[in-house]
Image: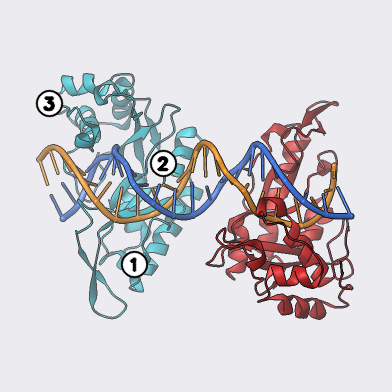
Chain colours: A red, B cyan, C blue, D orange
Amino acid sequence: MSQAPPPRSEEELVRRARALAGWTVGEIAGAHGVALPADTTRAKGLVGQLAERALGASAGSLDEPDFVALGIELKTLPVRPDGRPKESTFVCSIRLADLPDTDFEDSLVWKKLRRVLFVPVEADPALALPARRFGAPLLWSPSSEERAVLQADYERVATLVLRGEVEQLTGHLGTYLQVRPKAADSRARRRAPDADDGFIWTGPRGFYLRTRFTARILAGLR
Amino acid sequence: MSQAPPPRSEEELVRRARALAGWTVGEIAGAHGVALPADTTRAKGLVGQLAERALGASAGSLDEPDFVALGIELKTLPVRPDGRPKESTFVCSIRLADLPDTDFEDSLVWKKLRRVLFVPVEADPALALPARRFGAPLLWSPSSEERAVLQADYERVATLVLRGEVEQLTGHLGTYLQVRPKAADSRARRRAPDADDGFIWTGPRGFYLRTRFTARILAGLR
DNA sequence: CAGGATCCACTATTGGATCCCG
DNA sequence: CGGGATCCAATAGTGGATCCTG
């Protein structure tokens, strides 16, 4: 399986992403020697990982954006036939124990969202996975208003965790940044601080960008 | 059919509305000699008119709140078993021709929403109409934030009408104040200004309060 | 018709549950 | 597990259609 070298500049990364546009998932998978399951249920995440390979993302970066040297995070975005995103976008897991001690500026959320390369991919269920096409990429940074909303969403979550109210962390929270379960299944458990000095077990959660937020971004409504 | 005299003060109106709470629609209808259809489909609006009678609203006020002397508008609010409203709340019809010339301060929307007496009424489909109970009333005025949002919603509509874009007036518009059809049926037509000096025919529309807005109000989330 | 509203088929959104890879 | 995500049942929202009274 081939893996492209890291792009040396933002321009190079954007050139590569533009070159991807119009090709199908099947074509790109073939070019990189990646096998595609027939069933999309068995392929969750594969298109994202394929895009990483094709664009030269540093594989397995943990607390950093995908393109570490460029400070750019890569996100594939499943889009409907009309171009609007279908799903929310995973940002990062929530470290419940660290959250109250981490300012937004220093958070992984902010590190990843400061600059994002969105790569749309067709996700019409009527299209078989190999037939789906990559679309024109969008290199995005939040406006000051967007940043303020993201920060407010983050701080609301941090406050709840600080107060030990982790069970209030549901998908209802957040204007742009949403909180959702992030686990293989609902039986997974993590320790979280409780209201006193102890801890409680709760389901692991992640930060996601709401679909309507990425829809605004793609639509160029700034 | 009996009709209560107008209340002489806000306090008297609220006393009457509180006295209504707990009684059923059937009981109040009986007390006022009003017949109730068996079918709720044939009774649309009747509970609202019954509440007007019972509380002494000035019948047939047009461009004024129901209690003209008090400046208070009466709205019955159909609520689910858990107390949350089921439907949006009609405010007033949209006079398409006048809208662009009328500031929010002078609008019928603002005249009616400045002060509203909400009277909840059970609206669980499992309950027959006569068995549905009136709930505890809430005398409400918009906070400054709420007013600002209502005004922004209003002005967005006014702008679209001014530009002749009446076909953009759909239920999607508005954070708190929604635009919806307001007619006996979909064949009804009204004249509306077009982009030039002429007019086009379009369906009559009204301003409504979104269900989520009245839900916030009832929940006391201010 | 304007004011008082609700019905309901359809679509869109929600958010908890789940799946692959290394 | 953490990073890459999507699935899908249930709920909420939409808005056209409709109904009564004066």
Which image quarter: residue B162? Answer: bottom left
Depth check: B57 or B131 in front? B131
Q: Residue at x 68, y 76 (%)?
A: A21
Tag 3's secondary structure?
Answer: loop
Q: Earlier in the sequence, mark 1 or mark 2?
A: 2
Task: Tell us which disc is closer to us: 1 or 2.
Answer: 1
Q: Can you give x and y, in whole percent of width and height, for residue B130 in the image?
A: 24, 23
Q: Quadrant of residue B24?
A: top left
Which one is nearer the viewer's eye here, A14 or A127?
A127
| Residue at mark 1: chain | B
Q: Check chain identity for marks 1 and 2: say if they share one.
A: yes
Earlier-in-chain disc, 3 versus 1: 3
Q: How far across and how far down the image is residue A158, in percent? A: 76, 42
| A79 left or right, relative to B65 | right
Q: How many marks?
A: 3
**Circle 3 chain:** B
Q: Nearer the viewer, mark 3 or mark 1?
A: 1
- The answer to whether residue A184 is above or below residue B31 is below
Is residue B165 or residue B64 the one in the foreground? B165
The residue type indicated by label 2 comes to Ser
Compared across the picture, whether B55 is left or right of A166 comes to left
Question: Residue A222 appears at what percent x and percent y?
Answer: 60, 69
Q: Are marks 3 and 2 in one subunit?
A: yes
Which class describes the residues within 10 Å of circle 3: few (<14), some (14-19), or many (20+)? Answer: few
Instruction: Report how far apart the C-alphas of labels 3 and 2 lie in the structure.
Output: 30 Å
Which residue is tagged 3?
Answer: B2
The amino acid on which the numbered mark 3 sits, given as a three-letter code, is: Ser
Q: Chain of mark 2?
A: B
| Amino acid type for the residue under numbered disc 1 | Glu
The residue indicated by pointer 2 is B141
